[in-house]
Image (cartoon, rainbow, N blue to C red):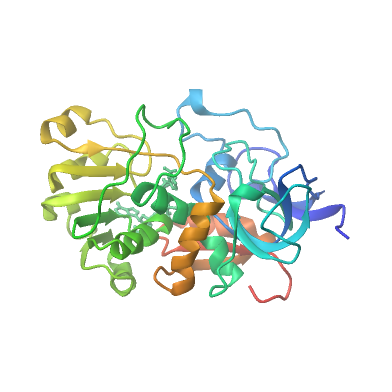
Amino acid sequence: MTAKTMKAIRLHEFGGPQVLRYEDAPVPALRPGEVLVRVHAVGINPPDWYLREGYRNLPPEWRPVIPFPVIPGTDVSGVVEAIAGNVDGFAVGDEVFGMVRFPGLKGEGAAYAEYVAVPVAELAHKPVGIDHLHAAAAPMAGLTAWQYLVELGHDQPNPLQAQRHHPVPLDGKRVLVNGAAGGVGHLALQVAKWQGAHVTAVASGAHEAFLRELGADEFIDYTHSAPEEVARDLDLVVDTLGGPTTGRFLRTLKRGGALFPVFIGFSDAQEAAQRGITVSMTQVRSSGSQLAAFGKLLDAGTVRVAIDSRFALAEARAAHERAARGHLQGKIVLTVADGEAW
Ligand SMILES: NC(=O)c1ccc[n+]([C@@H]2O[C@H](COP(=O)([O-])OP(=O)(O)OC[C@H]3O[C@@H](n4cnc5c(N)ncnc54)[C@H](OP(=O)(O)O)[C@@H]3O)[C@@H](O)[C@H]2O)c1
């Protein structure tokens, strides 16, 4: 039997990490096509603190009205506790992972909790070769790498640009990943390597050994050399920092190359056109089928998810304080299930 209340992290107002409150909340009710997941671990992602801060980094017209109290978070790994009618492919007791209801900017994912209701199309079976800690770290960052680099996988309108995003061929190509040690960066690097690219990783120097171990062919310490001054003749730049400075990478690309910023702010369209560079972005979307495909790489050890740090669910505030200090090497994860193997 499912308890009627659970522990969760909820926001009652916007603010710093101190507004993350560990408290009782109702166990979510299931709607048709959903399963209830007993959460073992929660991966944390930048949209979690964008929500906590009231999306002050987004243009005002993009900021949604948030219905307090709200449970942040999207990425979970856990065990199926209950199933609503009409669900195929999952049974009570299955180990699963997923990115829940993203993009849903109003906290629809509600993942910082002991239980989460997940549309079945957003779930995949957890790879048996990795534990819940690593599986929870994978969904948003992994799907971002997959949808940017391998397959978009949907026909929804692109909120970040008028045209559809198209991945580019990577076999034998020269790819630079900026922010390579971070959540998206370290997975994008490995996906590009898996696809046959020669990869240059850009990060601060402390991450060099880590990134070479993940397969980086070349490394640029941005604290010593500006990557846009050093790199040349690239086919693709994946800029996980993005923002207004992303246009500096245009000069590093061959004519016919592509720049994929992962965060909004690009404003050098004229220079891109003159140089014959395609600039393209997309917003990651939940997908159980893509997670299942990505999960095979995790299972085989072809792609490894790195854990920067872990905290108990009740310590979500400390996890967000860690995130705010920056320089992440992989992912931050919250652990939920008591005394279990994560
Ligand atoms: N389009 C989408 O749908 C989508 C999806 C996921 C994420 N995002 C966005 O992508 C961005 C990255 O997310 P994330 O989860 O990967 O963040 P993250 O885990 O915090 O990683 C950021 C990384 O960037 C590095 N970094 C910081 N300053 C740098 C600089 N000047 N040059 C090079 N590297 C630098 C940091 O370490 P070092 O400084 O120590 O190297 C860190 O490893 C966020 O803005 C997020 O909102 C967008």
Observer-nearest of 5 and 98: 98
* Picture quadrant where residue 317 is located: bottom right
The residue closer to the viewer here, 107 or 207, is 107
**Where does the image place residue 3, in percent across and percent down from the top left?**
87, 57
Please indicate, yes or no, whether residue 306 appears anywhere in the rendered image.
Answer: no
Can residue 299 be seen here? The reply is yes
Q: Residue at x 19, y 56 (%)?
A: 173
Residue 82, horizontal then vertical, whole percent = 79, 56
User: Hey, which quadrant is residue 64 in on the image?
Assistant: top right
Picture quadrant where residue 162 is located: top left
Q: Which corner quadrant holds the C terminus? A: bottom right
- Residue at 56% x, 52% y is 288
Side of 202 relative to 157 (left or right): left
Q: Position of residue 197 (x, y in %)?
A: 23, 61
Total numbered circles: 0
Residue 122 percent coordinates (x, y): 59, 49
Front residue (pair 81, 153): 153
Question: Which residue occupies the extreme top position in the image?
Answer: 61
Q: Relative to residue 205, is residue 11 depicted above or below?
A: above
Quadrant location, the N terminus: bottom right
Q: For the point 63% across and 57% down, which residue is it?
A: 316
Front residue of 302/107: it is 302
Q: Is residue 248 above or below residue 330?
A: above
Is residue 307 placed above or below 260 in the rendered structure?
A: below
